[in-house]
Image (cartoon, grey):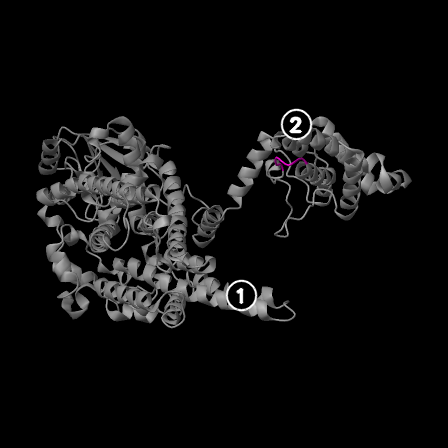
């Protein structure tokens, strides 16, 4: 390199260093160009190469890196140009710290430039790009988390997730709204101790027999010697895993009360999930969940766990909608499809069906109708929309639908057997008429309602059978749903569909009271398999409550959105939090209407004789209501017994009760022996006012029967 060239290089280097901060050479687009290929600057002309080398040297000196100089060495073709580049690059990078005004300034205390030059020199010596000194002014880098800290952070995200909070809130709300169910859970039952005692036994029996002899599931220890006796009423079979924990009446009561509370929590969570999936906001979803789980009419069903166990319905619908990428507010979004959610929805639907056909059968027919409509829509749109369904989703629906159908068919077999063996178990239109509510029932609350119970006493007295005819879903819910017809986040056509669903389900809930049921309930009763087993049309109100809740959720969501807009526009914005609190008012009003005064009577204690006497046995006195606590008392040993309570009375049981009114005498003893009964237990404290009153005064001489007193009971051994 000549002296003139070296001087030119030094003079070109100094101004560039002084005018441009380190690592910030602007490119043509206004950004920073540090990655331009070095080879583009090289050429076959020596002077051109030298000029390119000077430019590169200036750039590298400013950036404080040696990597680009190294790349420039490879870009030229002339050895003289290569030497020039190397020499100039070396001179350029050292100029800041050693020569010129900048070096003097560095020695005088101009620290920033001296530090930049030192960083450049260190970067060149290390053969690597030096760090950007301006990073000191940027945010600190994220720390490298250890495995325990990552686990803690993951747990924190899970705890703070919307669905975790929704589940916890649903559970806490269920405990409060059903109180005092969990106050004395081993000794009391909600509403009464008749049907809840039966269902406590059902839970215990399913768990016990599945652990000991699953093949005898449907031939329970009650209604001896009748087969298929476990199918005499809804079985709650889906709760069988809970029945495997604990033994005896007290554990059975504890199990029932816990599931009673959990059923309310699942109903709240399921309806919330459905509303959110369809497009409602959080508060709107909470209104839908609360109105579905704590509608006043459900307070009359507090003794029917199979009716309250309805949370699987909205939860399954939410999962299926999520799996198919569909919402009411946003329509069909193929990118949001998820086959796993769809399959899980079918499994939840199958579990819901296993809890009983009382509410599961209409749900099954609804799913069948939705599947049919979906298939038609898929067929119509298969050409206009690219893969409107998806292969994986199709397989998930196919497998899930088969599982659901298989569960339904397996559960239906015992009920068809019962219908075949016991023709008197079939419902008649006359019985449907007895339980069909008038239109006034939709505005009448049950006695268990804390707000409306006393006020509606006169209206209940006018109803033929008020426990199944007080169908008020809540006046607040009516108002919110009516508002949702005019002010909502749902489209107008969707509001009309929801309104149509409300009216149709109300008409079905009236049974034969609406146009004699000729165009509503009666065709279903006569033509749909299994529908003739549903004797209480009013329970269709479950669907009315869900649809009203969705209408209300649309209105509340729109209201919350408007409140956020108003809060953002206010100056100063201090009223914002108060406006946001106003959005909770609909939820609070819905919950207030759901407050209860449900009684929680103490269940009669198990007689000691039930823990010692073997079966087959008969406990007297016997009747529908008296036998249900006896079933509960048998959960220690599950002895076979003639006693049992269900939705109907088998002829053999009715005959046994009739014959034993004269017990002990020759005819009754002979009849029981031929039936296989070994022991008859008479409970002293329950004889008063029954046909068996005074039987303990009758002699047993000549009957071949021994009599033994065990506590408050008398045992006749045949």
Can residue 128 be seen at all in this image of the molecule? no
Q: Which residue is mark 1?
A: 564
Q: Is residue 43 magenta?
A: yes
The local crowd at label 2, few if under 14, some if 14 to 19, many if 20 or more residues have their Cα within 10 Å, is few
Q: Which residues are magenta?
A: 42-46
Contact? badges 1 and 2 (CB < 8 Å):
no
Residue 426's disc is none
State whether the magenta stretch is mostly helix, strand or loop: loop
Q: Nearer the viewer, residue 52 or 281?
A: 52
Q: Which residue is mark 2?
A: 79
* Up-down relation of residue 36 to residue 452 (above or below): above
Is 43 placed left or right of 514 in the picture? Answer: right
Q: Secondary structure at mark 2?
A: helix
Q: Quadrant of residue 16?
A: top right
Q: Nearer the viewer, residue 159 or 387?
A: 387
Percent x, y of residue 141: 66, 39
Q: Going by the picture, which residue comes out furthest to the right?
A: 108
* Up-down relation of residue 670 to residue 583 (above or below): above
Percent x, y of residue 60: 71, 37
Percent x, y of residue 693: 22, 46
Instruction: Tell me the quarter of the image containing the N terminus.
Output: top right
Q: Sequence order check: which comes first, mark 1 or mark 2?
A: 2
Q: Is residue 108 magenta?
A: no
């Amino acid at each position: 390199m000549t002296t003139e060239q070296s001087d030119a290089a030094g003079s070109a280097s100094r101004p560039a260093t002084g005018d441009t901060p380190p690592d910030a050479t602007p490119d043509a687009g206004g950004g920073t160009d540090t990655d331009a290929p070095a080879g583009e600057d090289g050429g076959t002309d020596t002077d051109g190469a030298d000029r390119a080398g000077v430019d590169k040297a200036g750039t590298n000196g400013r950036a404080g890196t040696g990597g680009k100089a190294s790349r420039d060495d490879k870009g030229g073709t002339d050895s003289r140009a290569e030497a020039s580049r190397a020499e100039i690059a070396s001179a350029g990078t050292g100029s800041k710290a050693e020569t010129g005004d900048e070096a003097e300034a560095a020695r005088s205390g101009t620290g920033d430039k001296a530090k930049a030059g030192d960083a450049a020199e260190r970067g060149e010596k290390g053969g690597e790009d030096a760090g950007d000194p301006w990073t000191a002014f940027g945010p600190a880098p994220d720390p490298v988390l250890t495995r325990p800290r990552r686990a803690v952070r993951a747990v924190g995200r899970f705890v703070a997730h919307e669905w975790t909070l929704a589940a916890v809130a649903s559970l806490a709300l269920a405990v409060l709204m059903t109180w005092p169910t969990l106050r004395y859970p081993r000794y009391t039952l909600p509403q009464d101790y008749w049907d809840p005692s039966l269902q406590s036994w059902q839970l215990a029996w399913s768990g016990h027999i599945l652990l000991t002899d699953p093949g005898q599931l449907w031939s329970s220890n009650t209604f001896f010697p009748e087969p298929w006796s476990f199918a005499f009423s809804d079985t709650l079979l889906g709760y069988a895993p809970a029945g495997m924990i604990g033994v005896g009446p007290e554990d059975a009561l504890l199990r029932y009360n816990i599931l009673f509370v959990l059923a309310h929590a699942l109903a709240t969570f399921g309806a919330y999930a459905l509303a959110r999936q369809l497009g409602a906001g959080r508060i709107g979803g909470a209104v839908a969940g609360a109105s579905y789980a704590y509608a006043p009419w459900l307070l009359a069903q507090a003794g029917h766990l199979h009716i309250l166990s309805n949370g699987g319905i909205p939860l399954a619908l939410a999962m299926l909608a999520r799996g198919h990428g569909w919402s009411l507010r946003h329509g069909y979004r193929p990118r949001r499809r998820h086959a796993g959610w769809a399959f899980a929805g079918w499994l939840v639907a199958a579990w819901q069906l296993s809890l009983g056909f009382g509410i599961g059968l209409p749900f099954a027919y609804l799913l069948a109708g939705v599947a049919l409509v979906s298939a038609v829509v898929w067929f119509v749109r298969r050409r206009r929309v690219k893969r409107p369904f998806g292969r994986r989703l199709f397989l998930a629906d196919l497998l899930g639908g088969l599982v659901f159908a298989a569960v339904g068919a397996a559960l239906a077999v015992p009920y068809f057997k019962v219908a075949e063996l016991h023709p008197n178990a079939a419902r008649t239109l006359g019985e449907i008429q007895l339980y069909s509510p008038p239109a006034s029932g939709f505005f009448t609350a049950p006695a268990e309602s804390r707000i409306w119970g006393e006020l509606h006493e006169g209206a209940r007295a006018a109803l033929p059978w008020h426990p199944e005819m007080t169908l008020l879903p809540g006046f607040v819910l009516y108002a919110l749903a009516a508002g949702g017809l005019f002010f909502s986040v749902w489209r107008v056509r969707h509001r009309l569909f929801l309104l149509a669903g409300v009216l149709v389900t109300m008409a079905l809930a009236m049974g034969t009271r609406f146009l004699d049921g000729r165009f509503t309930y009666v065709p279903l009763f006569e033509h749909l398999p299994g529908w003739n087993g549903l004797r209480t049309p009013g329970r269709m109100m479950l669907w009315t409550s869900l649809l009203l809740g969705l209408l209300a959720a649309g209105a509340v969501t729109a209201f919350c959105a408007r409140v956020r807009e108003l809060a953002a526009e206010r100056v100063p914005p201090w009223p914002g939090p108060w406006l946001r609190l106003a959005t909770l008012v609909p939820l609070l009003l819905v919950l207030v209407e759901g407050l209860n005064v449900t009684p929680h009577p103490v269940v009669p204690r198990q007689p000691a004789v039930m823990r010692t006497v073997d079966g087959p046995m008969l406990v007297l006195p016997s009747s529908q209501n008296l036998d249900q606590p006896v079933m509960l008392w048998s959960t220690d040993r599950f002895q076979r017994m003639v006693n049992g309570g269900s939705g109907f009375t088998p002829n053999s049981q009715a005959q046994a009760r009739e014959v034993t009114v004269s017990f002990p005498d020759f005819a009754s003893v002979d009849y029981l022996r031929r039936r296989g009964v070994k022991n008859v237990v008479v409970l002293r404290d329950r004889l008063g006012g029954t046909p068996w009153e005074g039987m303990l005064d009758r002699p047993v001489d000549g009957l071949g029967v021994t009599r033994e007193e065990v506590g408050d009971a008398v045992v006749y051994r045949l």
